[in-house]
Image: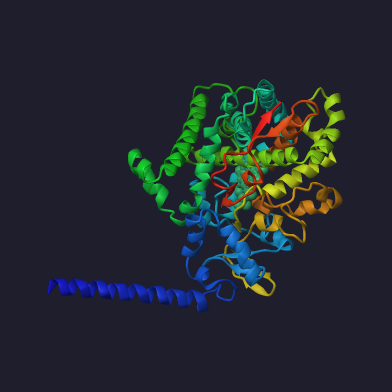
Amino acid sequence: MATMDKTTLIELLSAAFVLYVIGLYVYRMYFDRLSHIPGPKLAAASLWYEFYYDVVLKGQYTYKIRELHEEYGPIIRINPYEIHINDPEYIDTVYPGSSPRTMKYQWSQKMFGQRTDFFATESHELHRIRRGALAHYFSVQSLRRLEPGIQSQLDKLVSRLQGLKGSGTAINLLDVFASLTGDIIGQYAFARPYGFLEDPDFSPHWHALMIDVSMNGHILKQFGWMLPMMRAMPEWMVKIMTPQMLTLIGFQAAFRKQVIEVKERIARSEKSSGQTTIFYDVLTNPQVRPQEKETDHLQDEAQTIIGAGTVTTGHILAITTFYIINNPSIHEKLENELSSLMRENDGKPKWAQLEQLPYLSAIIQEGLRIGYGISHRLQRLFPDTVIEYNGYAIPTMTPVSMTSVLIHDNPSLFPDPRTFNPDRFLKQPGLKKYIFSFGKGSRQCAGLNLAYAELYLVLAAVFAPGRFKWELYETDITDVETKHDFMNTSPKLDSKGIRVLVN
Ligand code: HEM
């Protein structure tokens, strides 16, 4: 009898579950506020659709979204809650400046595990306050002051590369440039270059760590409870279950330690090194609110600044370097353009001088275009404005997004989009406004100026005429082309990197 009751209960619960799923499906399909937006029924019905493409197939939803646009048009519903638009002319509407107010999508912001940094901050107003406390460290003016610091790390790189000339040692440019950008931002943020450049192999663990953290993103987005749960579990258990999660937890703990160290230095009344360092400055700035000085918060800010400041610029540098080496005519044209500036400035021209060079500038735009920077869609929510697209009203508080991969590969703007062709920016300088690598509007990349300073200074240094002869080593286009979107871009998963020999 007891067995019968148990079976009936299970049957009843199963039937209730099936009814719930069907009811939810019908509701989302025909009655909810996004039911008028075109798109595949399965995507509108459940987040498992996105889960399949991004978690099971590892960062493939971006490419599926591209296919869906081909089928359903420029505005589509990509999951039960979110709309995606593929129309470069609509960028400024989805990504406005300070008005109308926009918010960040918390579901998506869980990707890297931070909670309170300004990158993840949901509210428009709080984002302005938090960004205000930090963004000025990345203004053009601040970076002109930082330039000698960037140059000194770059000098280290050049001398390491000179030491490798003719050695036959293959180096992975992804590691090389992640080491450089990591040391630059480490020095600026905490007055401690991490010493990545000094490692004989250019600290491959550093780039690998960033990619590990980034590969976790899709799971963390889908299962927001996972990271807090893992944090509460013993380390050995996390190691067995999801070793990548342990990497993220360790990564966050390292930033916490660095913030605490700065606080201890201040408590001991130690002066800063004389050069501006971001976290010392913020903590001693009376204009910054106490909430923005809390350890939990600064740990998150540190993770964003160091994380965002390293792998993105490093990737674009590596990818652009590959295309220059792989295209002798582009290489030659660049060397010719650089030659007099290099001669007149003892091989170390300033960022402001390099920015005046049209061909180098076009190469940088093309590197950003072809390498994307961030390959994931960037959502915005409009709390008090209904925006409209092609006659479709987008209700307030609906996450709406666009993606660099689709914009940068748009053949009407960029014919033959997978060909590296800097000339397109010389012929049509107006194309620059469609470069979406840094996002746009009020949440646009705060480190954009630092990224540009690094791109100009580093490319000029490694392609200074007569300084190095570069040769690709067991590397081809398949090691460069983005095949997976982990927010950060990733080539095929078994790639050994972008490897070169230096002579
Ligand atoms: C080529 C290099 C870089 C690329 C492609 C890039 C890309 C981006 C993108 C697309 C966003 C906007 C995200 C969104 O709208 O949701 C962003 C935000 C941000 N980036 Fe970058 N980034 C780069 C370099 C840097 C550097 C060097 C730093 C700092 C050291 C940095 C720090 C930040 C911060 C703090 C934000 C948050 C801005 C906000 O929410 O207000 N990035 N980045």
Q: Residue at x 57, y 33 (%)?
A: 279
Question: In terms of depth relative to the viewer, which is nearer, 130 or 347?
Answer: 347
Residue 132, percent across and down? 63, 44
Locate residue 145 relative to residue 56 in the image: left or right.
right
Which residue, as the protein is rendered here, is positioned at the far left? 1
Locate residue 390 relative to residue 235 in the image: left or right.
right
Locate residue 496 relative to residue 326 in the image: left or right.
left
Q: Quadrant of the C terminus?
A: top right
- The vertical placement of 439 against 325, above or below, is below
Q: Residue at x 56, y 54 (%)?
A: 123
- The vertical placement of 453 against 154, above or below, is below
Residue 270, percent across and down? 54, 21
Residue 116, percent across and down? 51, 46
Q: How is the image coloured?
A: rainbow
Question: In terms of depth relative to the viewer, which is nearer, 126 or 50?
Answer: 50
- Residue 116 visible in image: no
Residue 295, percent across and down? 48, 37
Q: Residue at x 34, y 72 (%)?
A: 17
